[in-house]
Amino acid sequence: MSRHPALPEPVAAALFEAEPQRYARLLAALPRSTALALLPAAARVWGRREGSGWTLVLPALAECLRSGTLTPDDLLTRTPAASFLLWAFGDEQRSRGKLRAPAGPLRALVDAHLGEDPDAWTIAMRLLPDFAGSVDELLATAGRAAGRS
C-alpha cells in the first residue's frame, strides 16, 4: 500500500480489512488523506472479536500519532466506534503503552459536551457500547439528549 500513494481509498480499505496483519504496520506511511479514510476500516478490524484485530490496530494508530500522520483530534472526531478508542485509551496494560489517551483534546470534548452534568454522563455511558459514531459524536449526542447546547 505504501508504495502506491495514488491507491484509491476503497481499495486501500479493502486490503487493510482483508489482511490487517500485513497492512496495519504500513498505515503511518500512507498519505494523511488515505490514513483518515482508513479509520472506519481500522474500527471494523478491531471489531472482529474472534481474532486479535485490536492487537494489530492499536500499534498502527499509535505509530500514526508518533509519525504525525494522524492527530489525537483525528482519532477522537473521525474514528467510528467510540467504544474502541475509549476502551483502548482506558487500559494502559491492554494497549501495552502503545496508545495513550490524548488528555487535552479528550478533556476539551468532555468539558464542552458533558461538563459536570450527571444526566449527560449517564446518557453517554448508556450509549457507549453500541454507539457507531466517533467519541466527539457520542459526547455531543449525550449532551444534546441531556438538554445541553
Image: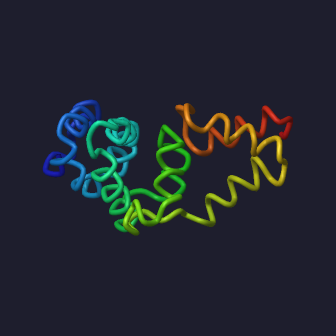
The reply, left or right, for residue 129 in relation to residue 39 is: right
The picture quadrant where one finds residue 147 is: top right
Q: Is residue 132 above or below residue 140?
A: above
Q: Look at 62% across and 58% down and name the residue there.
A: 106
Tell me residue 25's x, y (percent).
Answer: 22, 55
Counting the numbered discs, the total is: 0
Residue 68 seen from this side: no
The reply, left or right, for residue 46 in relation to residue 100 is: left
> What's the colour scheme?
rainbow
Q: Between residues 14 and 57, which one lies in front from this camera angle?
A: 57
Tell me residue 8's x, y (percent).
Answer: 24, 34
The reply, left or right, for residue 90 in relation to residue 127 is: left
Tell me residue 123's x, y (percent).
Answer: 74, 37
Q: Between residues 39 and 99, which one lies in front from this camera angle?
A: 99
The picture quadrant where one finds residue 143 is: top right
Tell me residue 60's x, y (percent).
Answer: 31, 56
Q: Look at 68% across and 43% down and name the residue there.
A: 139
Q: Look at 50% across and 51% down and name the residue there.
A: 87
Q: Look at 62% across and 44% down and name the residue there.
A: 136
Q: For the C terminus, give its image quadrant.
A: top right
Residue 59 seen from this side: yes
The picture quadrant where one finds residue 129 is: top right
